[in-house]
Image (cartoon, grey):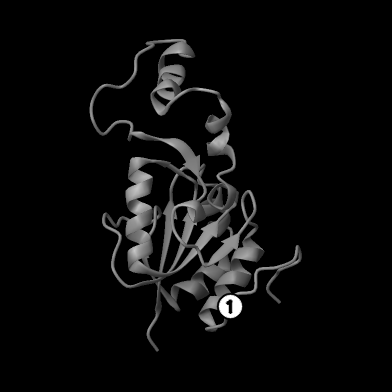
Amino acid sequence: MERLKIATVWLGGCAGCHMSFLDLDEFLIDLAGKIELVYSPIADVKEYPEGVDVCLIEGAVCNEDNLELIHKIRARTKVLVSFGDCAVTANVPAMRNQLGLDNAESVLQCAYVTNAQYNPVKPKEDGIVPPLLEKVQPVHAVVHVEYFLPGCPPPADRIKALMVQVLEGKTPKLEGTQLKFG
């Protein structure tokens, strides 16, 4: 039996969803025998591959790098799962949308100069800070998403319930507050 090609991605967020994924503990050993982890911040893979079966996407779309990557992911992946509240609603990263600042450049000015205690200067070298989008958006506002796994972060038992359904070839049913495996 061919193993499912699984990816996890971290856009604009805190990595809490990936930490919750690691909380799968012993189930990770079972999972390792049934999937091929082809891309993840916990693996040293530089380019998002073709032919991915399922991708768990953590974080909101905040900058041009996120935007480019999410379009590449959508084009190369069968099933996208918005993984956690930042991906589902834009959550905490979208707080900058409410700052009343007129553009992304104002956000950088506020963060690196106005509110800096030491060395108030914006990074000047290209590639240090990716260009910000004017507004932070949830993943589904940018590309089509098949499933939503809310939570900040989603608890490990909900992640496990999703993964078990995917591995069994079932259409995931992600409903109710008591979704658990077993």
Q: Residue at 31% across / 22% down in the picture?
A: 123
Is residue 126 in view?
A: yes
| Position of 74 relative to 119 (above/below) | below
| Position of 153 relative to 172 (above/below) | above
Is residue 124 rendered to the left or right of residue 24?
left
Give the residue at mark 1.
165
Which amino acid, by three-letter code, is at mark 1? Answer: Gln
Q: x, y percentage for residue 76? A: 33, 67
| Position of 44 relative to 12 (above/below) | below
Q: Residue at 52% across / 79% down in the picture?
A: 167
Q: x, y percentage for residue 59? A: 50, 48
- Which quadrant is the N terminus positioned in? bottom left
CA neighbours of label 1 inside 10 A, class few (<14), some (14 to 19), many (20+): some
Q: Residue at 45% across / 78% down in the picture?
A: 34
Q: Residue furthest front?
A: 102
Q: x, y percentage for residue 21? A: 54, 59
Q: 165 or 63, which is in the foreground?
A: 63
Is residue 127 rendered to the left or right of residue 120?
left
Q: 106 or 37, which is in the foreground?
A: 106
Q: Quadrant of residue 9?
A: bottom left
Element marked by disc 1: helix
